[in-house]
Image (cartoon, rainbow, N blue to C red):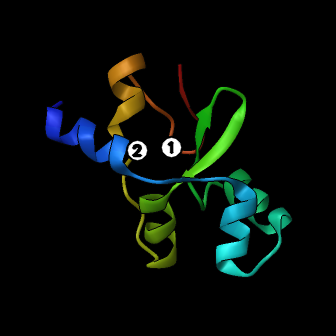
């Protein structure tokens, strides 16, 4: 992976499920359901779920991007809807 790709991941804004719900004018419960169904990708930061701004944009545009490279760099592989950073 390249340093440019690393910078892109670090520059991507992380939103809490509550912030995401506020942006979409919906409930937190809806956001959690979308994450559980795998429709909205999220990243684990410790034990907290966070949604990358780019993943929210992909969800809103109906496209599905591959997993971000951050977890793959650290752990070898990353699962789209359950990624964790150390």
Q: Is residue 49 left or right of residue 9?
A: right
Which class describes the residues within 10 Å of circle 2: few (<14), some (14-19), or many (20+)? some
Instruction: Say if mark 2 contacts mark 1, CB within 8 Å.
Output: yes
Question: Horizontally, is 4 left or right of 39 in the view?
Answer: left
In the rendered structure, which disc, 2 or 1, sits on the residue that comes first in sequence?
2
Query: Residue shown at 41%/61% (left/top)?
Result: 54
> From the viewer's perspective, is 66 left or right of 86?
left
Q: Is residue 81 above or below residue 54?
A: above
Q: Residues within 10 Å of mark 1 (few under 14, many from 20)?
A: some
2 horizontally vs 24: left or right: left
Image coordinates of residue 13 in percent, x first then y, are 46, 54
Number of residue marks: 2
**Residue 9 screen position, x and y as percent:** 34, 43
80 w.r.t. 74: above or below = below
Quadrant position of residue 4? top left
What residue is pinned by disc 1?
A: 80
Q: Secondary structure at mark 1?
A: loop
Q: What residue lies at 45% left-to-right and 70% top-to-bottom? A: 57
**Front residue of this view, candidates 77 and 46:** 46
Q: Which mark is residue 71?
A: none
Residue position marked by numbered label 2 in the rendering? 67
Q: Position of residue 67 (x, y in %)?
A: 40, 44
**Coordinates of residue 79 in the picture (x, y in percent):** 51, 36
Please name the residue shown 66% across and 78% down the image.
Answer: 24
**If the image is split into quadrants, where does the N terminus sit?**
top left
The residue at the point 72 percent across, 29 percent down is 47
Q: Gap in Å between the C-alphas at discs 2 and 1?
A: 5 Å
Kindly state the secondary structure of the residue where label 2 is placed: loop
């Amino acid at each position: 992976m390249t340093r440019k790709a690393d910078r892109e991941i670090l520059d991507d804004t992380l939103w809490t499920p509550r912030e995401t719900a506020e942006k979409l004018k919906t409930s937190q419960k809806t956001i959690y359901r979308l994450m559980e169904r795998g429709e909205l990708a999220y990243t684990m930061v410790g034990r907290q779920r966070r949604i990358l701004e780019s993943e929210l944009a992909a969800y809103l545009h109906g496209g599905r991007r591959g997993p971000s490279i951050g977890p793959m760099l650290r752990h070898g592989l990353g699962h789209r809807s359950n990624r964790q950073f150390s």
